[in-house]
Amino acid sequence: MFDISIKTHFAGAHHLRDYPGDCEHPHGHNWKVEVTVRAITLDELGMGIDFKVLKQIVNKVIDELDHRDLNTLPAFRDINPSSEHIAMFLFDNLQTQLTHDRYHLHSVTVMETDNSGLTYYGRD
C-alpha cells in the first residue's frame, strides 16, 4: 500500500458559538491541510494517483473555504466551524472524488496553528 499526500492551506475567519473564551469572538487562522489517499495498486505509469490530479481536486474544495467567514457558509450555519468540523467537511466533500478501484481517501489533517491540529479518518 501507498499513502500519497499533498499539503495545502487556506485563510479564513470564524468564531465558535457559545465557546467560553476568546474563540467566541471573530478571529482568523491560516489553516494548513494535508490530504492523504491510500493506494492499493499502481497505475501503468507507476502511480497511485497523480499529485497534479490530487492537488486539483483538493484545491477546488479548499477554494470554497479560502478567504471566507466560515460561519456564513451553509455547511457551518448550524455547527461551529471548528477544526474538527472543517476536517469532516473536507473529507466528506473529497471522498467521492477520491474513490477509485486503486485508491481511496484515507485522511484529512487540519492544523489550526503550527502546534495544534487533528486528523480525521472518516466515519465508521
Image (spheres, rainbow, N blue to C red):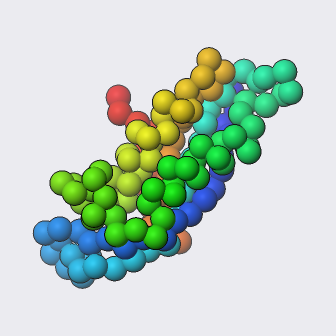
Residue 60 coordinates in the image, percent (x, y): 55, 50
Q: Is residue 117 left or right of residue 45?
A: left
Is residue 86 depicted above or below 96 in this figure?
A: below
Taking the spot 62% from the left edge, 17% from the top edge, the residue there is 101
Quadrant of the image for the N terminus? Answer: top right
Which percent across, then down, holds residue 108? 50, 47
Q: Is residue 97 left or right of residue 69?
A: right
Query: Residue 28 falls in which quadrant of the image?
Result: bottom left
Residue 36 seen: yes
Q: Residue at x 66, y 42 (%)?
A: 54
Residue nearest the viewer, comparing 68 with 109: 68
Horizontal relation, residue 59 to residue 47: left or right: left
Q: Residue at x 37, y 73 (%)?
A: 13
Direction top: furthest residue: 101
Q: Quadrant of the C terminus?
A: top left
For the point 35% across and 33% down, the residue is 123
Residue 68 coordinates in the image, percent (x, y): 40, 68
Establish if 21 lies above or below 107: below
Residue 80: x percent and y percent?
Answer: 24, 60
On screen, 70 above or below 28? above
